[in-house]
Image: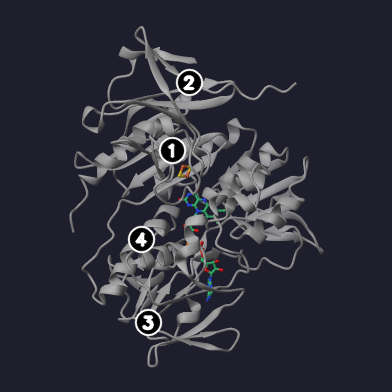
């Protein structure tokens, strides 16, 4: 293998580069990234960076130890096509890179509000540029309406509250985060909003945004109009895979891979938020950090299935001074049992059980116990 | 010298967090098979905001409870990403059954 092209210059792409070098790959490495920034960390964009407590520089993912990576960065450049026949990646700059291996790490983007757009002071939050633009509009006293009470919505609400805005969150589902945490724990998270002076409206969808040039309100399906100076749309993310249509790659809700990150094309692996392992896409930071180790091994071995990534999914979220951590595979119907602490105190750990076996664990402000349980969980995972 | 606790209150494999003039410090007592010693480092991870006293102790290293960066308790050095900078280390002393952390006096501002 003499040339590897990594598409996507964020956490998964950088992790792939580090893994390739750590595993002895000494050929040419090109990283193509659509954003003009060096790889940076996204989680603080809704937390300390948005709050003004962290600088853009502190988000840098590259450290001194990365100087030896010898990477050719093609930033501000988009990959527009991969050609399986001659193993090339075509760029928006119209040149084309011939290579022996491709790592797809194009991540995801914020889902747009259907029919939205065109109005000023309507934001989504995925990139550093998004965060800078949003922060400029988060002025004390302004009325902020957040569409979607998922993780991004909840974290932005928490940060905006801290900045002194008047915040309303609208959620179409009856209980926010129920898909991730189940009803009981979802409800507990939902209560954080009210306790911190944020209005949460659930079970009601958004019909449209109201306003002439800048947004003035959000009209709900029941006809109510919520007055708004600023709107944040936080209704999930979609994988950046459209550019791969027609490449011969099998696509679904992401680039379809097996647990060794192999796609159906022998020289192409996929990692991070754009990859769907057996159809299941994970949008967690830790996955984007760790999974590329396996992808690099698969690519270098030229053989699928020899190295696999089966770690229990893990993520965290910081809301209103509460650190929420979750690990494992929860499914509807799992029983949830508090085993430590007290949910009312917002310091507890609960275990999800299926047929008496722990399958997932959630904690608020209980990092130490959570770490112990997260490890224990590994022993209960199916060994496939 | 800052008192931490009674030696009996920090068994092998345990950690405790103290705050000295606004600096949180994490003190560890490593397992016997890792030497059994006491170590003290800055409690706040150099990556983002997490308390290392709540981390996972593995030999002479602690794994951050948030994003799993590993720090060597003896040197403070991270073994890899996401942390890129070391944490400060502090000597630990035992005197008359009490654990102390030796913290250099902060530079006096005249
Ligand atoms: C505001 C925010 C807060 C978050 N908070 C948390 C959290 O608390 N906990 C947690 O576990 N996770 C969190 N996440 C999720 C985490 O950041 C992602 O899982 C992680 O960034 C995924 O990394 P990635 O490299 O796969 O994709 P991304 O970070 O999405 O990067 C993909 C990169 O590829 C580029 N790209 C796309 N298409 C092309 C193309 N055709 N050519 C070239 N480049 C392309 C994109 O511009 C982008 O820079 C958060 C995300 C956001 C946005
Ligand atoms: S905060 Fe410690 S590794 Fe991120």
According to the picture, the residue beneath numbered tag 1 turns out to be B76
Q: Residue at x 59, y 24 (%)?
A: B22
In-front residue for pair A151/A58: A58
- Quadrant occupied by the N terminus of chain A: bottom left
| Secondary element at image label 1 | loop
- Quadrant occupied by the C terminus of chain A: bottom left
Discs 3 and 4 carry the same chain letter = yes
Residue A2: mark in rendering: 3
- Residues packed near mark 3 inside 10 Å, few (<14), some (14 to 19) or many (20 plus): few
According to the picture, the residue beneath numbered tag 4 turns out to be A291
Discs 1 and 2 carry the same chain letter = yes
| Secondary element at image label 3 | loop
- Residues packed near mark 1 inside 10 Å, few (<14), some (14 to 19) or many (20 plus): many
Task: Measure how far apart labels 4 and 1 are at the Cα level.
Answer: 27 Å
- Mark 1 touching mark 2, by CB under 8 A? no
Q: Between tags 4 and 1, which lies in front?
A: 1
Which residue is farthest top?
Answer: B96
Mark toward the start of the polypeptide (1 vs 2) = 1
| Secondary element at image label 2 | loop
Indicate the chain on which mark 4 is placed: A
Q: Between tags 4 and 2, which lies in front?
A: 2
According to the picture, the residue beneath numbered tag 2 turns out to be B102
Q: Position of residue A284 (x, y in %)?
A: 43, 54
């Amino acid at each position: 293998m003499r040339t590897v092209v990594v598409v996507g210059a964020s956490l998964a792409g950088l992790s792939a580069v580090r893994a390739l070098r750590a595993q002895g790959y000494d050929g040419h490495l090109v990283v193509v990234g659509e954003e003009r920034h060096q790889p940076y960390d996204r989680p603080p964009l809704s937390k300390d960076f948005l709050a003004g407590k962290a600088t853009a520089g502190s988000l840098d993912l590259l450290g001194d130890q990365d100087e030896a990576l010898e990477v050719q960065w093609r930033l501000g450049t988009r990959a527009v096509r991969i050609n399986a026949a001659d193993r090339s990646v075509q760029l928006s700059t119209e040149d084309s890179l011939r290579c022996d291996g491709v790592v797809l790490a194009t991540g995801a983007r914020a889902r747009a509000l259907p029919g939205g757009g065109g109005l000023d002071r309507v934001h989504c939050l995925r990139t550093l540029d998004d965060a800078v633009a949003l922060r400029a509009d988060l002025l004390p006293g302004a009325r902020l309406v957040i569409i979607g009470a998922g993780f991004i919505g909840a974290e932005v609400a928490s940060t905006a509250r801290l900045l002194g805005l008047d915040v309303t969150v609208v959620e179409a589902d009856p209980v926010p985060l129920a898909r991730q945490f189940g009803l009981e724990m979802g409800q507990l998270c939902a209560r954080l909003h009210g306790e911190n002076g944020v209005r949460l409206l659930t079970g009601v969808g958004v019909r449209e945004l109201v306003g002439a040039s800048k947004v003035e309100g959000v009209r709900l399906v029941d006809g109510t109009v919520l007055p708004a100076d600023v709107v944040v749309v936080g209704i999930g993310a979609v994988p950046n895979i459209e550019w791969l249509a027609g490449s011969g790659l099998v696509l679904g809700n992401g680039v379809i891979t097996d647990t060794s990150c192999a796609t159906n094309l022998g020289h192409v692996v996929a990692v991070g938020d754009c990859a769907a392992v057996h159809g299941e896409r994970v949008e967690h930071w830790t996955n984007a950090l760790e999974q590329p180790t396996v992808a690099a091994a698969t690519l270098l071995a030229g053989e699928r299935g020899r190295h696999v990534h089966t770690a229990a999914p893990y993520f965290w979220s910081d809301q209103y001074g509460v650190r929420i951590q979750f690990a494992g595979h929860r499914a509807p119907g799992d029983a949830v049992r508090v085993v430590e602490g007290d949910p009312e105190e917002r310091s507890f750990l609960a275990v999800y059980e299926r047929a008496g076996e722990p399958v997932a664990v959630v904690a608020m402000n209980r990092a130490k116990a959570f770490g112990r349980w997260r490890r224990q969980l590994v022993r209960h995972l199916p060994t496939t | 010298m800052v008192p931490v606790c009674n030696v009996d209150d920090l068994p092998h494999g345990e950690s405790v967090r103290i705050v000295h003039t606004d600096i949180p410090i994490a003190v560890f007592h490593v397992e016997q098979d890792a030497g059994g010693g006491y170590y003290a480092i800055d409690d706040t991870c150099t990556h983002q905001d997490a308390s290392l006293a709540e981390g996972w102790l593995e030999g002479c290293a602690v794994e951050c409870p948030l994003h799993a960066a590993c720090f060597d308790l003896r040197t403070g050095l991270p073994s890899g990403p996401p942390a890129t900078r070391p944490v400060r280390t502090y000597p630990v002393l035992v005197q008359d059954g009490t654990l102390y952390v030796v913290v250099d006096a902060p530079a006096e501002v005249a």
